Image (cartoon, rainbow, N blue to C red):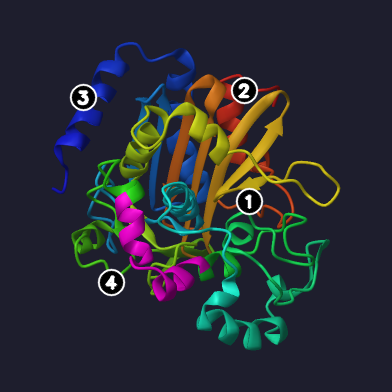
Amino acid sequence: MIRTALTASLAALAASAALAQTPAAEEFAAGLAGYRREHQIPSFSVIVLQDGVPVVEEYLGWSDDEGDVATTADTAYYSASVTKTVTGTALFLADRAGEIDLDRPYSDAADWRDFCEWFPDSGIILAGGQIDGVAVPDFECQSQTLRQGINMQVNGEPGTDFLYNAMVFARLGRFIDEVHDRDLRSLVYAYALDPAGMENTAAGWRDHDRGRVLSYLAPPFHVVDGQFVKQPFPDDDFRGAAGLYMSPMELARFDRALDDGTLMDAETRAVLWTPPDNADGTPSEYSNGWFLQDYQGERLVWHSGWQPEAYSAIYLKIPERGLTLIAMANTEALWWGNRLDRAEIHRSDLVSAFMATFEIGNP
């Protein structure tokens, strides 16, 4: 077992909370087994936190090739783009501490110049085109800054309209590795993983200090004609846009540290989630690695994760309610096809069920 004292502490909180579990929590938890069956998910882990205390904690299915190893609190997943919430927060804090400068242009790094020779004509949709009815402004290498990259404002005129561009977000890591004294992994350790007590989170395959986590990784599957087909493991190293391997319990630690003052105070957290403006003066829907969404009078702060035909994840906070939903799966079943130009987590069927059960907005 890789559980630490902090894991035991969270487990104890969950046990005590179970005595006072709300009817909404009980109803939501009761529906998760059926959701797993309906969506054909081998390994499915879900935690709901209320004011930092787990009120739902479900580990369903199996986490090995043969279906012999049950999913547990220790089961780890590739978190895909949910990684951005952790790295975005860490880089935000490093900038405020003066260790990095998010207003530096990407062009200060030689890696960016190489990227610029390739990306605009790569044929990748994020470089320009149209997908699912969304016009993607042409990407041109201009004076994009790291801050614009972390806020997803790099297509078209830099610093104007939000458009989700994970390719440029990922260059944050390459920039920092080339230009700054400490590499990205070290910064994320210093400003997020270590303060939050995330001792069982691996930052990429080459994280030699935390590589033990990978032995608890649920292998990825894709459902083809009703059959589970095992997929290759993602092999990209940690670059900031993706690459954290963790269990939902580990992300719950980050969530608690974000809310209880361990990582930052409430005033600083408000700045973290204050987006820049779009070209028309309206607030963007993305800030420092987080989607921001106003939905029927509720403020939703979130990120999804999607590794096609392999993994998916949801991390949703409703700050005014003190509620957090964390869900991870070893298929792409949790992905709902969110558009590149807007935040619409309410379109997730799991999130829709969660909001209906907990009476969030008017779903």
Question: Answer yes or no: do the residues labelled 1 and 2 have beta carbons within 8 Å?
Answer: no
| Amino acid type at image mark 3 | Ala
Query: In the rendered image, which residue does mark 2 sit on?
Result: 360
Please rate how many residues cluster around mark 3, counting C-alpha atoms within 10 Å: few if below 14, some from 14 to 19, many from 20: some
Question: Answer yes or no: do the residues labelled 4 and 3 have beta carbons within 8 Å?
Answer: no
Q: Which residues are magenta?
A: 172-190
Q: Which of the 4 quarters of the picture holds residue 65?
A: bottom left
Query: Which of disc 1 and disc 3 is earlier in sequence?
Result: 3
Residue at 21%, 64% (x, y): give it: 211
Closer to us: mark 3 or mark 1? Answer: 3
Residue at 53%, 20% (x, y): give it: 321
Q: CA distance from mark 3 to mark 1?
A: 34 Å
Question: Is residue 219 shown to the viewer in this render?
Answer: no
Residue 260 vs residue 221, the one in the foreground? 260
Query: Which of disc 2 and disc 4 is earlier in sequence?
Result: 4
Q: CA distance from mark 2 to mark 3?
A: 27 Å
Closer to us: mark 1 or mark 4? Answer: 4
Query: In the rendered image, which residue does mark 1 sit on?
Result: 336
Query: Which of disc 2 and disc 1 is earlier in sequence?
Result: 1
Q: Is residue 39 magenta?
A: no
Residue at 81%, 61% (x, y): give it: 134
Query: Which of disc 4 and disc 1 is earlier in sequence?
Result: 4
| Amino acid type at image mark 1 | Trp
Q: Secondary structure at mark 4?
A: loop
Q: Which of the 4 quarters of the picture holds residue 53?
A: top left
- Label annotation for residue 142: none
Give the dominant element type of the magenta stretch: helix, strand or loop: helix
Quadrant location, the C terminus: top right
- Label annotation for residue 206: 4
Query: In the rendered image, which residue does mark 3 sit on?
Result: 12
Please rate how many residues cluster around mark 1, counting C-alpha atoms within 10 Å: few if below 14, some from 14 to 19, many from 20: some
Q: Position of residue 278 (x, y in %)?
A: 78, 49
